[in-house]
Image (cartoon, helix red, strand yellow):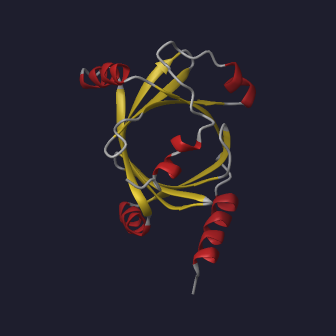
Amino acid sequence: YFNTTSFFGIITWVFRNVRKDMGFEIERKFLVSDETAEKYLQMVSEGKLKSHEIEQAYLTTDPVIRVRRSDDEYYMTYKGKGLLKREEYNLLLTKESYETLLSKADGNIIKKTRILIPFDKYTVELDIFKKPFDYIKMAEVEFESDEEAMSFNKPDWFLEEVTNNREYHNSVMSRKVF
């Protein structure tokens, strides 16, 4: 039988040894205003931008093991420690596997609309969270290197940077008590 520690140890080993096509995620996060979020939601409704409906939950937050539904695709993700740069591995799931794992998750199930916004050579992922986190509108940009991330010139509509604020990690949000 598996106890919790050995189960997560096995999952961590699988992610690190089976899926070598992933690696590190390097991203910066910024808050955006309600008005900006509304503007981009309107552009989605007009067919000018694409979006995804995301639902995710966490099996554990140390290490971070997340299950996610993005439209009709399902994943389990392992994320290492870090703020700007983190180890990340993804495995595809079936809908049935996702639903089983979702039922075993602890804490809040996080739901959000993710809008994909072209900006220079990047794609800004604007996450507009649903209740109970509907006060958060956050833009994320991914980079190929630390140097590229640090030299990024953000657009004017980005507000406070929250890359180094753990309170804006979805895994931390999943544990928030209301």
Closer-to-camera residue (178/144): 178
Which of the 4 quarters of the picture holds residue 165? top right
Does residue 163 appear to the left or right of 58 in the view shown? right
* Picture coordinates of residue 6, whole percent (x, y): 64, 76
In the drawing, does residue 5 fall left or right of residue 104? right
Question: Within the image, what quadrant is residue 137 found in?
Answer: top left
- Up/down of 2 relative to 105, above or below: below
Residue 102 on image: x %, y %? 40, 63
Q: Residue at x 34, y 49 (%)?
A: 72
Give percent across and percent down for residue 135.
36, 35
Residue at 24%, 20% in the rendered image? 46
Report the residue that reaches farthest toward the left: 46
Farthest residue, direction right: 147
Percent from the top left, x then y, of residue 97? Answer: 41, 66
User: Between 54 and 111, which is closer to the camera in this rendering?
Assistant: 111
The quarter in which the N terminus is drawn is: bottom right
Q: Is residue 93 left or right of residue 39?
A: right
Q: Residue at x 63, y 36 (%)?
A: 164
Q: Is residue 96 above or below residue 163?
A: below
Most distant residue in the bottom direction: 1
Q: From this viewpoint, which residue is outermost toward the top?
A: 156
Residue at 66% across, 37% down: 84
Up-down: is 64 above or below 147?
Answer: below
Count of residue discs: 0
